[in-house]
Image (tube, rainbow, N blue to C red):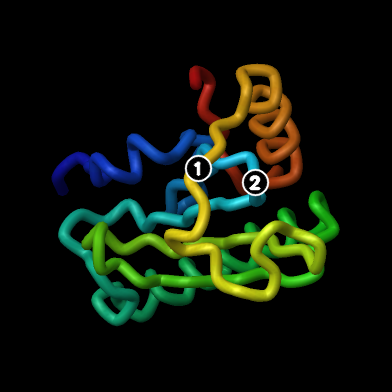
Amino acid sequence: MSEFKLHPQLEKDGIWLGDFELSRVLLINDSQFPWLVLVPMQNDIGDIYQLDSCQQAQFWRESKRLSEAVMALYKGDKLNLAAIGNMVPQLHVHHIVRFHNDALWPQPIWGKLPAKPYSEQQKQQQIAQLQQALQPHFQVVAEY
């Protein structure tokens, strides 16, 4: 089995929080929305149907854990999930917490606003809160 390689665009846009059994969890570096991405650690997979049935079941369990954790943490009004992959071919599913009063409600967020990166303090706070919320089935990254 070859070593997992994260697509360069996901590496550039995301902050690695840690891993579930199957999937890597990234926080997208845009402070305007609580926005996480779940990436199955399988090379050369572009769509969910390409995962075997056990991996699919595991992926949806991890997505459920992530979804429940971020909605409890951020108290959002809606959680948007999307697996588009037109620009980044590696399978990744966006989990975006939305609020009735956010800058783009009710429209989708894609390509509407330039990203507003977290300050270092905000980033460290988000990492700590999210890693705590995702316990106990989560392997945190020691260095970020």
Q: Residue at x 51, y 28 (%)?
A: 141
Between 131 and 84, the residue placed more toward the observer is 84
Q: Residue 102, percent across and down?
A: 74, 59
- 125 on left or right of 88: right
Q: Is the residue 17 above or below the residue 98 in the image?
A: above
Q: To which quarter of the image does residue 108 belong? A: bottom right
Tag 1's secondary structure? Answer: loop
- Residue 96, percent across and down? 60, 61
Count of marks, rendered view: 2
Q: What is the secondary structure assignment of the residue under circle 2? A: loop
Q: Which residue is mark 1?
A: 115
What residue does disc 2 label?
32
Quadrant in the rendering for residue 125: top right
**What label sits on residue 53 in the rendered view?**
none
Q: Is 39 on the left or on the right of 88, as rendered?
A: right
Q: Amino acid at mark 2?
A: Gln
- At label 1, which amino acid type do we have? Ala
**What is the C-alpha distance between the residues marked 2 and 1?**
8 Å
- Please report the residue visible at 16 percent of the width from the left and 60 percent of the height from the top: 44
